[in-house]
Structure formats: structure tokens, C-alpha cells
Amino acid sequence: MSPQDQDNQENSTHFGYQTVDKSEKESKVAGVFHSVAAQYDVMNDLMSFGIHRLWKRFTIDASGVRPGNKVLDLAGGTGDLTAKFSQLVGKDGQVILADINSSMLNVGRDKLRDRGLVQNIEYVQANAQHLPFEDNTFDIITIAFGLRNVTDKDEALRSMFRVLKPGGRLLVLEFSKPEQELVSKAYDFYSFNILPKMGELVAKDGDSYQYLAESIRMHPDQDTLKEMMNNAGFEQTTYKNLTGGVVALHKGYKF
Amino acid sequence: MANNTTLHQQLLCSALEAIINKALALSLNGTQSLYPLEQKNLVVYLAELGFPLSFIVNNSKVLVTSLSENPDCAIHTSVKTLVALKNEQSLTELIKQDKLDIVGDIKIAQQYANMAETLEIDWQSELAKHIGDVPTYKLTQLSKKLADKLGFAVKQIQADSTEWLVHEKRLVVTSSQIAAFNLQVSELEIHTETVNDRFLAIEKALLNRSSKQFAVNSNKDSSE
């Protein structure tokens, strides 16, 4: 490989099945989420048949959150996890809902305020690769269905590791690789044939949901992500497949 | 991995949470009973479930999860024992019998139980909001009639079964009695057959004897 090719590879990344310049991905992903923000919750319920709520509940249970904890809900979008964490950490705790996308953050903030959840939640527009928090700040960090959209995942994991307190844990809930071939085929058919049409019909944006399906396929599988977390410094990293591996929850500690 | 168990667990927690909060929202007594429980965590380990049910109150809402770390009160028991707990006096007895184990502040458990007991929902008003006053009235009357008839039927069944247990059951032939009777019938049948055989033998002997006598008499007459 010539130095120029190597340089090109280092500066490029995936945007769905396309290979784009790293500097381009952020704005392209931003475009997708600005476009889907208003319909995000409806589409999540439709696409997953409501099961995403159970996956998120499982993440909360796996977090071991306690009253008084400080939680960072990264790429928190419309605030499903933040809402639950806010109630569980109580008035002595704090939850930061962070998202790189202002549209998603606005939808999340409005939704949580409408539900009367205001006392212990803060909203921060932040890039997961460069988290604007001091070292050793959080007891728990979660990133649900967000990591695959991050341009440099390794850098983001290192950044999360930095802001976690010793003893703190990171939970990554993300689409992954189905365990069985049959499930995988059915899932592929659903993702590439039904999902974009559903997006076109409901959110009037088939392209964004085509990107969603492609980005899931390009995301590292369970073991690769586990390795990436270990490389970032996390210890006792484990994962649990949900719904046959369609989704996996990775958990790692900082000691 | 037990994917389905995990999701069923979450589904159960989610359903319980929705039911409890809906019931609290409809309760005539409001959510006052929740105030002393704010941020208090009760964890219940039911033998039938295999995973903990954690209840925590926040802003007059009850959250149900499977989080089990550092609860204010933890109860290890079974559904059957929980039903028996309705009788407060049985608490000590159940603990002695190892059917109930409570760790932590028992007052928290009592306050949660108190919350459940003070739930009072005006179902008629709630129903009227959805289907109107007149249909609600008619439906209520119908359900009262049905309840009365059902109550009467239950009482009747109870009375009949008591009657049967106290009086009729004594008269009913038991299976061992039927077996003994059958045995006696079989023995009687054998005896009857034996007697019959003996009768036949005697009859045959008598016939032989009378035919011999007849032959002797005939010979005597002819010689005379």
C-alpha cells in the first residue's frame, strides 16, 4: 500500500455503504438526524414493534444505577433513557442528556419537560469524540443506538473512558450481528426492503432509513466492539445479545 | 443466552409499572400514601419468578425494575406466602417457618402494603367518562344482578356440597365396599354352582335308582 493510499484510508470512514472523508461523515449524519428528529420516536416504535423500549429497560437494569449517581446519556436523542435515569437517581443525582445533533436534543428536551422531568437533567450538545467534561465525572455512561454514527469510534470510546469515574461503567446498546443465519436473512430482508419504505411512508424520508440499515451492517460485530472497548481501557467487558443478536448490550468498567 | 427471558422480564416490569401507576392515578385517595416512600427502594424476590422486582417511588410515581443493589428493604418469599400475609398476625409465623425473609427496614414494606390497601377506585365514574352515564348505570345494574345471581349460585353450591359432605357422603358406597360386594357375589355364584351340581348328581342318582327299582318290579311281575 502506498503512503498516499494509507493516508486516504486513515482519513476515510463509512457512511452506510459509502466510503467518505472523515470530515464529511459528521455533517452527513447530522443531515440524517435533523431530517428524522421529529418522527424519531414514532419510527422507533414502528420499526422495532416497540421492542426498543424493552431493550432500553434492560440497559437501565444492567447499569446498576443508584440514587445519587451521575449519569451521562450520550447520543441520548429523544431522552428515553434519560427519563428513566432521572427518576432513579433522584434529586441527589444528575443526568446529562448529550447529543451532537441540536434537532434531536431539542425534541428530547421538549419531551422530557412535557413529562415534568426537569429537576436533575441537563442538556449538552456534545461530540462523543471530544466530550466537554472533566476527567472522572460520571458513574455511568450509556450510548444507545448512537455509537455506529460516530466518525471515530475508538476515539469516542477513549473519551468516554476519560470522563468515567473509577468504578464507573459504560453501557453500549447497539444493533449487532444476529446469532442465527435464518434470523440474519429475515432481518436483512426487513432492513433493506421494508424499513426504507416505512421511512418513506411515515417520515417521508426513505434515504435516511436506507442509511440506518447500511450503517447497522457496517457497525462492528459483538466481539470486535468488545475488543475496541478493551483497547480503550475498559475492563471486565462483557456483552449480552438481545432478540437473537439483532441488538447487543456491551458493558465495560473503568477501574 | 436467555434472550427471551430477559425481554419477558422487562415486559413484566413494564406492565406492572403501567398498571400500578394507572391505579394510583385513578385512586380516590390520590398519591398521598407515596410521599413517605419517595426514593425508598423495596426489592421483592419471588420464588416463582427467579429475578427480583424492584419498586422505587419518584415524584409520586412507582418505577418497577430488576435493579437489586442496596435496597432499603428486601423480601424473599413466594406468591402463596404473599397471599397469606393478608392476615397480619401470620407474619411472625411465616418468618419462623422460613417462608418469608425480610432484610432491611420493615416499615418500607409496610408502607408499600399500606399504599396497595388504600387504593380506592371509583370504577363507575371512570367508566362513565368513556361510555356515558346511562350505559354505565345499566351496565352497573346488570353487573350487580349478575353478581347477586353468582353469589346465590355460589351459596347454593356451598350448601349442597356441605349437605353432601355431612349426610350423603356417608351413604355413598365406597369402592372397597363395591369390591367386597363383588367378591361376595362371585363366592355366592361358586356356592350356587356347587349346590346346583350336587342337586344334579342327586337327581341323577335318584333317577338311576328309580329306574333300577322299576326294572326289578317288572321282572317280579313277569315271573309271577
Image (cartoon, coloured by chain):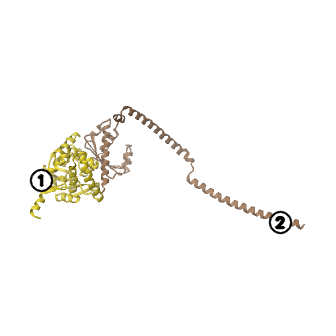
Give the number of the mark in front: 1 or 2.
1
Left or right for B38, reference B193:
left
Subunit of label 1: A
Q: Which residue is mark 2?
A: B215
Q: Check the rendered structure and report the hue given to chain A.
A: yellow
Horizontal and vertical percent for residue A189?
27, 55
Quarter holding the C terminus of chain B? bottom right
Instruction: Name the kind of residue labelled 2 in the image.
Output: Ala
Quarter holding the N terminus of chain B? bottom left
Q: Considering only vertical position in the picture, is B12 above or below B146?
A: below
Q: Secondary structure at mark 2?
A: helix
Horizontal and vertical percent for residue A102?
16, 45
Q: Alpha-carbon distance for marks 1 and 2?
A: 141 Å
Q: Residue at x 81, y 65 (%)?
A: B212
Q: Residue at x 32, y 53 (%)?
A: B5
Looking at the image, which is closer to me, B92 or A138? A138
Q: Which residue is mark 1?
A: A23
For residue A96, say whether it is visible.
Answer: no
Disc 1 crowd, CA 10 A, few/some/many (<14, 14-19, 20+): few
Q: Secondary structure at mark 1?
A: helix
Are the numbered discs 1 and 2 placed on the same chain, yes or no?
Answer: no
Subunit of label 2: B
Instruction: Name the kind of residue labelled 1 in the image.
Output: Ser
